[in-house]
Image: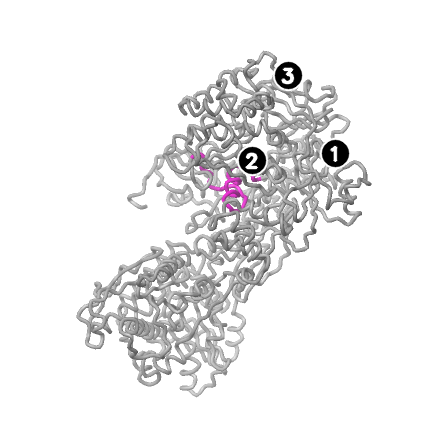
Amino acid sequence: MDKMRKVFPVRVNGEAVRLGGGLLLTSLQALGVRLPFICWHPDIIDSGGRCRACSVVVDGKMKPACTTYVREGMIIDTKSELVRSLREAAMAVDPKFKSETRLGSAAEILALRPSSKEGTVHPRTRYVIRQPELCNHCNLCVQMCRGVQGVAAIGELRDGGTDAELSATEVKGFHGTPLPQTECVNCGQCINVCPTGALREASALDVVREAMRDPTRPKVIQFAPAVRVALAEEFGKAPGEQSLTREMVAAARLLGDNVHVFDTNFSADLTIIEEANELLERIRRSLTGEKRYGPDDIHEALPQITSCSPGWVTFVEKNFHDLLPNVSSCKSPMQMAGALTKQYWARKHGVDPNDVVSIAVMPCVAKKYEADRPEFSTDGIPHVDAVLTTREYAELLRTHDVDPTALDPTSKLAEFDRPFGIASGAGLIFGATGGVMEAALRTAYEVVTGRPVPFAKLDVQPVRGMQGVKAAAVKLENVSREWKFLEGVEVKVAVAHGLSNARKLCEEIRLANHHGLPPPYHFVEVMCCPGGCLGGGGQPKPTSMDIKKERAKLIYKEDRDLPLRKSHENPAIKELYRDFLHEPMGHASHELLHTTYSARRPEARVLLSQSSDAKFVKDDILHKRYPEGSRALLTNMFSDVVDVIGYVSEGAIAAIADHVGASPVNIESALSHYHYFPRSPETPDTTVYVCESIHCRQHGSDRVREQLERRGIKYHMTSWLGWCVDGAPAALVKRVGDSRIHHLANIQSPNDPRFDSLDTFENPLPDINFNVLSMRRFSPNAPSVIEDVMLSDADKNILASGTCPVSLKAYATDPEELIKDLDCSMLRGCGGAGFPTHIKWKAVRDQPPGRKCVVVNADEGLPSTFKDYYLLRNQSSRMRMLTGMAIAAHVVGAKECYIYLRYEYKNLKPLIEEDFRRYRTQLNAKVPDDLEFIVCLGGGPYVCGEETALFESLEGNLPQARTKREFPTVRGLFDVPTLVSNVETFAWIPSIVYHGGDEFHDLAMLPELGGAKLISLSGDVAVPTLAAIPMGMTLRAVLEESAGIPIEDIAAVEVGGLTEMLTYPSDFDLPLSLAFKPGHLSAGGSIVVFRKDNFDPKHIFRAKAKFYEIESCQLCAPCREGSKIFRNTVDTIMDDDARLNDDTLDTLHHVFHSMELLSNCGHGKACGKTARIMLDNKQKTQMSLP
């Protein structure tokens, strides 16, 4: 453990211990506590929190150890029966863990988990193969590609586009394009982190096995330096325990006859001779304009950048065309060895090059791609016929029952063939990041000065280690006569490993070029893979930076132990130049050892230059409305494109990606998670979205679907429109060329003429005609000065007078006093969580000065809730909300206010924007000039009502809840302190500020609760009703005043909406509150009433199960898989009248209980609770649901 790492006293499984700070998972591992996990990787910062298999109890709550940080005083339980059973239940639905679970009925549970993919292999390239049915959605491949490598060639895409019932997420390239046509560089790092085998390299074993069966053909096998220090891990050895340099050679000779074994370290030495001389020649020509050797057209561009990493070469070809002249013309060591094998060794031994099978064992998947490049062939004969990764070589040995760790390293079989088996330590260290640079400096410095490089024992420490970018400088003094032009020159070098680090160096070089500045370096080494070749995409799994460090130690130890440590002192290299190549950079070298590289354009960039959509979107939408380089408001961009084109085309995606500086697949991935932004060119000019909420189904939404189908009109389903509470059954209509959406409400007749005029009828802002019940209906003695959010007289006076006394008072009052008033009011968040508002405000205010945000969550996607639509539809309550936001910004010190508005309320966006303009310019509100109000549209998913998913959507990321769930008051939108509340909460603020917190508090029927709350009533009621009820009022009293039907006719109600359980008459006398106290009902946002003569619990549970499944954001396994099991369990119970046996019911109970406790956000937790209670009732009755 790092001595500087802080430790904390905690209790683990009842024992007092001290744990190091950081992630709980790694701290427990250091303590010797083993936990299963699948979605976390130590090298990927944002990984974890998806599979939930590592969950433990922390202070009485289940939390994933991979996203929980150690803090003082924690009480941690990792092995109680409850923890183990819940963890196993989570693992039971995961394809990785299903064979390891102890749950006896796991197979039956898995049968209830529908497979969305057939068990087939989907090759996307000749180098990377994916098997979707093995994918467990850990997202490590995407995070590695995007976050660590900075390539972003793959993303999590959902098929289905505009349907509410989206298909499962699948990892793909942009628009399903084959990976070679995307940004992919074939590095294989995605394979390295894939825990299930869903991604793997395309195997060349069949080619090799076939060759081995033919004793007449010479087989030449070369081994890369990094292979020998990792191969033992495939045979049970610990990382860094054993290098198999000679053993791997002996093993190769046991595979067949006529096998010759070469060391790629030899050609690495050869690379250094050519590359060092190329560098010196570039510097000579740059400084003096004179040529000494090499072709006339040699590039003079500095810095010279290495070319031995094929993934890096592809990266620069696809991303930095202007830096191609900087890339060394030297082939990689593998290709130099391959060329010499076919064109020198074969001819020297009288063998037809066509008969030689050239095999390379490499740590790298990209080498497979490199071997296929036409540049690396002569007269159509490839220099390398097959590339095996280290993993493949180990598999080959195992099929021959060969364990290299058991072979004798002193045997004659263990010797490389000469002369290509003689190599220096400089060639060996190519396997580690910085190794090429160190080897080059050992040679170049000595060539120029005649002296060894001035580092102890030739170890060039400044370029060693796992730091992402390393820089060093070596001054040349007392140089030999022919290098006098270098006297006093400080040679500046840099090393980068991992492509995100390479990008940083490229940008630095490009910036210097752009401004006409001297190059920042003379020589740059880039290795595609983190850690260099020893961390290559074909190395043994698992791999991590710690494992790579152990492998590097082996490389450097072997280098120190070798008698030969400088490439230019290799006698076999000298012999090769004497007998064949003659001189570095000479004609023979140019023909065999050098090549050229060319610009390549991913498919998205082709679209960007050729697609008319791309040009239109970029010029007419993006440049005119959105700042470049920012992904914020991405959903607004999608909406604008759909308004004009009708769908978000490939060209539009490419244009958006270019405009915001993101990868096209990242943009498409985010796009695919929204309901209302079609991606198909077959999208009709008029698109219909039919509401399938329980409310609309009760009023005939199936009839609407039938009429649309009869007329051949394409439609999609959506979960809840909001305004349809007064217009069921209803549908939303979107037309190309019209920025508005139109509302098809109260469709009662199959011959409704609007069916025949969908492309022309208009209804952009439907009025909702329902009862509006003021607080005075329930609390007639409330102070007369209080105006609730639904009374508009005071607001009308404000608008008429041109002044805003609330704002004036707020800006004249000490912010701390305003927070005290909120405390007195006992106002809680009105979205359902019920968190005390004053605590949020104070927490954000107490954060250090800097960027802060205020966010309104106006994405009320829960079916049966419609209060936001009412509040936003009316100008008076809109102004109250805006005033509340402005006051909040003043108190907490924010300059940015965002309103996240659900897409179904899209037409309200210009009204909100106009009201803020009026609020700022026409009212004497004293709003600071630098206060911004920005309205961002949602896209349909219910999860964006979850505050962290809302933040992710606003930031332009996938709309999924964050797994590392810090308080938004500390790290919210854009990772800055954020105050987030819903529309109603902000709308109450003006009254509290103007009249005082005590008067709001006194509205409550129970003093310990305080205040009031808006409730939407729908279902089997006389008239849909929006009621402002005092906290503490009983459910019975609300129903008697608001339902409009006899209380005795009510069978049950949903208090809080579809995601809550049914409440029966026996609990109608419980008080409603937001305090979550025992014996209270959560006020939530809605109440749905079910009459006895219209009460079908099976239908209700079916609707709940469908909603939970289709609205799962697919991020965490308990919710993603558990919601599928819940839906199919409901279908099984209902459709087949099945009686699940007790063991299966108990196991399902464990699964749903784990879902309730382990899911990442409230959606999965609510689903688990609903499913578990349903099972409880099933077990009680074995006849029907409650």
| Left or right relative to 340: residue 908 | right
Query: Mark 1: few, some, or many residues within 10 Å (few <14, many ≥20)?
Result: some
Q: Are marks 1 and 2 in contact (CB under 8 Å)?
A: no
User: For the point 33% across and 66% down, which residue is it?
Assistant: 303
| Left or right relative to 136: residue 822 | left
Residue 1047 locus on image (x, y percent): 72, 19
Residue 398 locus on image (x, y percent): 48, 66
Q: Which mark is residue 255?
A: none
Residue 87 locus on image (x, y percent): 52, 41
Residue 483 locus on image (x, y percent): 22, 74
| SS category of the residue bearing label 3 | helix
Which residue, as the protein is rendered here, is positioned at the far right? 751
Q: Which residue is mark 2?
A: 914
Q: Which residue is mark 3?
A: 777
Closer to the chain start, of discs 1 and 2, is 1
**Position above or below: 632 against 1091:** below
Q: Hey, which quadrant is residue 467 in on the image?
A: bottom left
Q: Which residue is mark 1?
A: 698
Q: From mark 3 to mark 1, how far is it between C-alphas?
A: 29 Å
Closer to the chain start, of discs 3 and 1, is 1
The amino acid type found where label 3 is placed reads Arg
Which region shows up in magenta? 943-969
**Which quadrant, please, contains the C terminus?**
top right
The amino acid type found where label 2 is placed reads Glu
Viewer-nearest of discs 2 and 3 = 2
Closer to the chain start, of discs 2 and 3, is 3
The amino acid type found where label 1 is placed reads Gln
The foreground one among 396 and 670 is 670
